[in-house]
Image: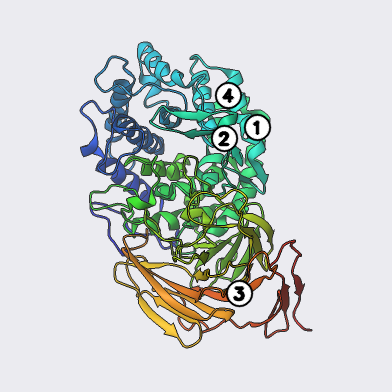
Amino acid sequence: MRDRPTAGLDLPPEDRAGAPVTGWTRRHWIAVADHLLASLRPYRSPLGARISPPGRGSWSGGDTDGLEGFARTAVLAAVRLAAGDEPARGRLGELADQVTAGLLAGTDPGGPERWPAVTDYSQQIVEAASLAVALHESRPWIWERLTPGQREQVAGWLGGTVGRGVRENNHVLFQAVVGEFLASVGAGHDRGEIEDRLDRIEPWYSGDGWYLDGPETRHDYRSGGPREFAVGPEAAYDAGRRFDHYNAWGFHLYPLLWARIAGERAGARAVLYRERLHRFLAQYRWLFGPDGAVLHQGRSLSYRFACLAPFWLGALDGATPLTPGQTRRLASGVLRHFTERGATDPRGLLPLGWYGEQSAAAQVYSSPGSPYAAAMGFLGLLLPAGHPVWTAPEEPLAGERADLTAALPVPGFLVHRTAADGLVRVLNHGSCYLTAPPAVERDEPHYARLAYSTRTGPVIGPEAPRIDNHLALLLPDGTATRRERIHPLAVTDRYAASWHRPLPPGGPVPGAAPPPVVSVSVPAGPWEIRVHGLRRPPGWGLREGGYALAAEAAPETVLRELPGAAVRTAPGANGPGLVSAVLGLHGWTAAEVHRREGANAFGHRCAVPLLVLPPAPAQGCDESSGRIEVVVGAVLLTGAPGAPPAPEVTVRVAGTEVRLAWPDGRELLVRPVLPWQAPVDRGPAT
């Protein structure tokens, strides 16, 4: 089904024999790549060194934004050149000439379109890595056709990255990639710096193929303008446990791209990177729906199908648990999913957003050229047309037609997938991104929520409340506490648990740290049971949100006699209709629905079902009394007709002990308190 046909995109016929799931072939990928490149032509500067699509600029300024647009699309051009001429009918020479002209104009130190010089901690270091990758993958087309003087000029600009200070996160890899390219062409470089940058990611490797995006305690942040950074021990701050799609389009992508440039020099490092990639893909594949939808969690989500890069690298390097047919099925499913849901606008551009334009979903470092990091999702075109990924019939992913609960203990995720609707939910009890100083309220909606999915996104925007998939203590004035640092307690295939401190608005008050909240999530069919243990100061209320549903038309509201509420969207441009519901099982006394406009990446109008508890009385459950309040609710997100109106689970609460019982005799005994004790998990009756 083509929900939002992309204007100007001329696709070849589907091949349901070789691609029985998606119908897409290598020619479809080439057609999309050609369309993206052609759509950018009106936004090239006169000499071609800048590509500046319209839209909100980044904090780096217009000149750097134009460089970003050029560098990222240069990667797509390089991959397209490597893919070969068919069916471009000779246009690839023109494409190579365009990239070459822009490259020379940007690196000309006295030219009118010269790129900003590389400085410490700058965005130019990021874009230099894209240029290095593009030049390596298109060597016969661009680099080898440059004169010696032109090569010296290009290497001179790229060499500005050598010796520069670099951000304490995935940016260290960009310096390694640029340095290795310079080494490969005989230009000045620092071998010690390359090795140091690769070594820097080792302490961040956390197991099962997952990397933290930098240390939990960082020592650098932007303190002012583009060149103003606080660095060193005095700049230390808690950055959180950052697990997200940067594992795909950063920590597995760039080390293996470095290895492609380094060749035999990569040696044991390349072997290690491939082993880690294999382990990562074994889990990462669970974050994609069978409809091609991608988990909507983390930052830089405008990169969209860049998340496919590690799957292609797995095929390129023989480092994947997927068969060739499964790799193509997953990758083509994702590209088709985005293409048919408005990822490109009527001009053929990739705007800041998810399906369409939604600049509120983008970070301040993102420019209109940032989404073209999606070029890394086309690395499969480096595989020749005769490779098994392109010739083997598509195959379903293992278990994609079955319900699944799968623990990802390193990032603190519990994957909850239902076969009836293909929805993938991730219950989040580990990943948190704490924004850098000088921010005071440091939670981020794409990390702080209790759950995310492939069909919903959090409520976002500068005035957005903390409301969806969030447990909030409500101050007497109605403002909500926030969930910043998440402390994992346990992740198994049956449940996940964590604790956090519910921070009130503003900065922390010395000596007044709020009592912790312990949260436990338990999948139950399409439902999730949420158990919380907490203490409330007198006069404070409580609120629990379900998933935010968004569409162009306002979601329908359904209130229930029991404490419960539901919202429903009709089938539309983003797929079949959905239902999001909450149901109070213990402690909750009321329900309501919150509505908002222009605050969700999945549609203009969104609605969130809520459970509510009025303010605690004067002798309520405060920290000094030592009493702990337990609330239990059920959260539903489903696209399947006839979903059960309530979870098939019996809940009994005695003090702080919660007993969950299933009809088949299974039981789970949970105590949502600290010190934490693992729940007692009793199997079904025999």
Question: Label 4 amino acid?
Answer: Ile
User: Separation of disc 3 and disc 2 at Cα?
Assistant: 46 Å
Q: Secondary structure at mark 3?
A: strand
Left or right? Give the position of 573 relative to 325: left
- Mark 3 is surrounded, within 10 Å at the Cα level, by few (under 14), some (14 to 19) or many (20 or more) other residues, namely many
Q: Amino acid at mark 1?
A: Arg
> Residue 403: horizontal and vertical position, in percent?
59, 71
Classify mark 2: helix, strand or loop: helix
Amino acid type, residue under disc 2 in the picture: Pro
Question: Number of callouts in the render?
Answer: 4
Q: Which residue does the image show at 26% across and 28% down from the upper left?
A: 48
Q: Is label 4 in contact with label 3 (beta carbons under 8 Å)? A: no
Assess disc 2: are there few (<14), some (14-19) or many (≥20) residues with their C-alpha within 10 Å of its C-alpha: many
Q: Amino acid at mark 3?
A: Val
C-alpha distance separating marks 2 and 1: 9 Å
Task: Evaluate if marks 2 and 1 touch, with contact meaning CB atoms under 8 Å apart.
Answer: yes
The nearer-to-camera label among 1 and 4 is 4
Residue that numbered label 3 is attached to: 631
C-alpha separation, residue under disc 4 versus residue under disc 3: 52 Å
Can residue 322 be seen from the camera position used here? Answer: no
Mark 2 vs 1, N-terminal side: 2
Residue 471 on image: x %, y %: 53, 66
Q: Earlier in the sequence, mark 1 or mark 3?
A: 1
**Marking on residue 194:** 4
- Find residue 255 and name its label: 2
Which mark's residue is nearer the viewer, 2 or 4?
A: 4
Q: Earlier in the sequence, mark 2 or mark 4?
A: 4
Residue occupied by mark 1: 269
Which colour style is shown? rainbow
